[in-house]
Image: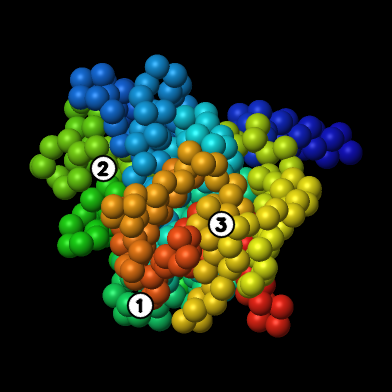
């Protein structure tokens, strides 16, 4: 009996030692990884901060890497990088730009639900297509880019936001897996394998809650284990590089797997061994061995080192920064709705729960299967002020500006211009009885509104 009591006490003592030494939940292997990355991590972070002082503003991703590594971004130019990124996103409309912006805003301590008056989260949420895919371009749609879908998912996860149709988002991603378990950035390519894309796909699968024993995860992990080099490294585009190591480390961690153990611990080293071979004496990383410092290689390597150190992906760490902004499960701006009826000189606006009926001096009409609405009243219905509406009589050009988006239309021109980029409308704005009429759907959707057409009542409903 005494012997059993002693055994019980020994087991209890060992358990207590384990819990205190491991922080209660951290697995023992994580501490070994921490010891190996602590100094390289600090050196890489110091390099990026020194680079900013010497050369100026960094990539938004460098500030993301510094933030998740635990560095204070006060006094840096992180906010300036976010402002530049917003301008670039509004110009391009690219999903990848908006997703990066959300991550960078969180890194800088900003609110992605209200950044310079913009709800960036809502912008991405509303870009999910019927297929479940997040559009390649918020302004122009598209379903070709796997990475656009992945980064949208990760940005929403980091912001603590819901995915409107999570099931379809997951199914769309799973359907793009190749027979060998790999993924490729071009979703239309069904054969070419890519390490980086596969690591990113695992990140998204983890963010979507896919367990590590699911077939899609197991196939992707098996592919990565098969293509890993005997020295522990990974190659993409024909060369071993630290960025590919980073993607694999993030992907495996996202689905709850140890990137330094078992099948990923090769005879001549593991992924971390391979990654650290690219670090230079000044703390930076080279993209290809022998080519010198590279900012992208450095910030991605810093993110990988941080993931190993904390046993937590970069997007999980950024999610902690979103908590102050989550006053409700899905913070969204108040809805705005407007209703126009063909032939009716009044329209209805519902904003913040209040309904108003307003008068127009001209009525909407249908021509060439498009509904046209008087420009000024359409702009008012979207929440625009007179300052955002301009008309150049010499060039017959209408310009509407709101929330960082500028829509330019020219009478007789079947192209519309969103932040300077041409997009076919199919029909042209019209000048009739001294009034300018615009195609309602194109204008409303350019500003992030959803447009519904009720044929029976000939009603256009515009919903934000």
Q: Residue at x 42, y 65 (%)?
A: 431
Q: Residue furthest right?
A: 1
Numbered tag placed on residue 378 in the rendering = 3
User: Disc 3 and disc 2: Cα gap in Å?
Assistant: 48 Å
How far apart are the two marked residues, 2 and 1, measured between alpha carbons? 28 Å
Please identify the quadrant where the C terminus is shown: bottom right
Residue 141's x, y, as percent? 43, 67
Using the image, determine if residue 290 lies above or below residue 168: above
Is residue 446 something one can see in this rendering? yes
User: Would residue 98 be found to the left or right of residue 365 on screen?
Assistant: left
User: Which of the numbered marks, if any, corresponds to residue 297?
Assistant: 2
| Of pointers 3 and 2, the one earlier in the residue sequence | 2
Dot 1 falls on a residue whose secondary structure is loop
Q: Please identify the residue farthest to the left as the structure is shown.
A: 290
Q: Residues within 10 Å of mark 2 (few under 14, many from 20)?
A: many
Q: Of the residues under marks 3 and 1, which one precedes in the sequence? A: 1
Q: Identify the residue at horizontal 38%, vertical 70% (top origin).
A: 428
Which quadrant is home to the N terminus?
A: top right
Mark 2: secondary structure: helix
Task: Check if mark 3's residue and mark 2's residue have beta carbons within 8 Å.
Answer: no
Q: Specify the label residue 339 is tagged with.
A: none
The numbered dot on residue 188 is 1
Q: Quadrant of residue 289 in the image?
A: top left
Residue 377 locus on image (x, y percent):
58, 54
Quarter of the rendering containing residue 460? bottom right
């Amino acid at each position: 009996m005494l012997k059993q009591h002693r055994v019980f006490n020994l087991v209890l003592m060992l358990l207590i030692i384990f819990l205190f030494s491991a922080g209660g939940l951290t697995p023992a292997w994580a501490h070994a990884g921490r010891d190996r990355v602590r100094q390289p991590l600090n050196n890489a972070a110091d390099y990026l901060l020194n680079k900013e002082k010497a050369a100026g503003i960094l990539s938004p991703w460098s500030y993301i890497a510094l933030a998740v590594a635990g560095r204070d971004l006060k006094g840096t130019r992180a906010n300036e990088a976010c402002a530049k990124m917003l301008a670039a996103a509004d110009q391009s409309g690219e999903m990848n730009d908006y997703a990066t912006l959300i991550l960078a805003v969180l890194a800088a301590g900003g609110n992605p639900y209200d950044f310079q008056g913009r709800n960036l989260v809502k912008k991405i949420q509303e870009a999910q297509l019927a297929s479940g895919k997040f559009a390649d371009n918020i302004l122009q749609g598209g379903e070709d880019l796997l990475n656009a879908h992945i980064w949208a998912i990760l940005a929403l996860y980091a912001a603590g936001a819901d995915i409107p149709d999570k099931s379809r988002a997951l199914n769309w991603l799973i359907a793009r897996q190749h027979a060998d378990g790999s993924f490729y950035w071009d979703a239309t390519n069904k054969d070419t394998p890519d390490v980086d894309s596969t690591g990113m796909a695992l990140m998204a699968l983890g963010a979507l809650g896919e367990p590590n024993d699911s077939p899609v995860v197991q196939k992707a992990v098996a592919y990565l284990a098969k293509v890993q080099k005997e020295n522990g490294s990974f190659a993409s585009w024909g060369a071993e590089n630290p960025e590919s190591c980073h993607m694999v480390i993030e992907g495996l961690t996202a689905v709850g797997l140890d990137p330094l153990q078992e099948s990923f611990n090769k005879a001549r080293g593991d992924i971390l061994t391979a990654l650290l071979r690219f670090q230079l004496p000044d703390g930076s990383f080279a993209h290809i061995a022998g080519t010198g410092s590279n900012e992208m290689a450095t910030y991605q390597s810093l993110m990988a080192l941080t993931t190993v150190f904390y046993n937590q992906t970069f997007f999980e760490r950024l999610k902690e920064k979103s908590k102050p902004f989550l006053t409700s499960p899905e913070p969204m701006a108040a809805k705005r709705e407007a209703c126009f009826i063909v032939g009716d000189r009044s329209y209805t606006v519902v904003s913040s729960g209040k309904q108003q009926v307003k008068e127009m001096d001209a009525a909407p009409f249908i021509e060439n299967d498009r509904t046209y609405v008087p420009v000024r009243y359409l702009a008012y219905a979207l929440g625009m002020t007179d300052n955002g509406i301009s008309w150049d009589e010499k060039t017959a050009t209408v310009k509407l500006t709101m929330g960082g988006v500028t829509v330019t239309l020219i009478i007789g021109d079947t192209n519309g211009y969103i932040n300077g980029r041409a997009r076919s409308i199919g029909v042209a704005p019209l000048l009739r009885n001294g009034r300018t009429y615009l195609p309602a759907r194109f204008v409303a959707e350019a500003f992030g509104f959803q447009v519904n057409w009720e044929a029976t009542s000939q009603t256009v409903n515009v919903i934000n």
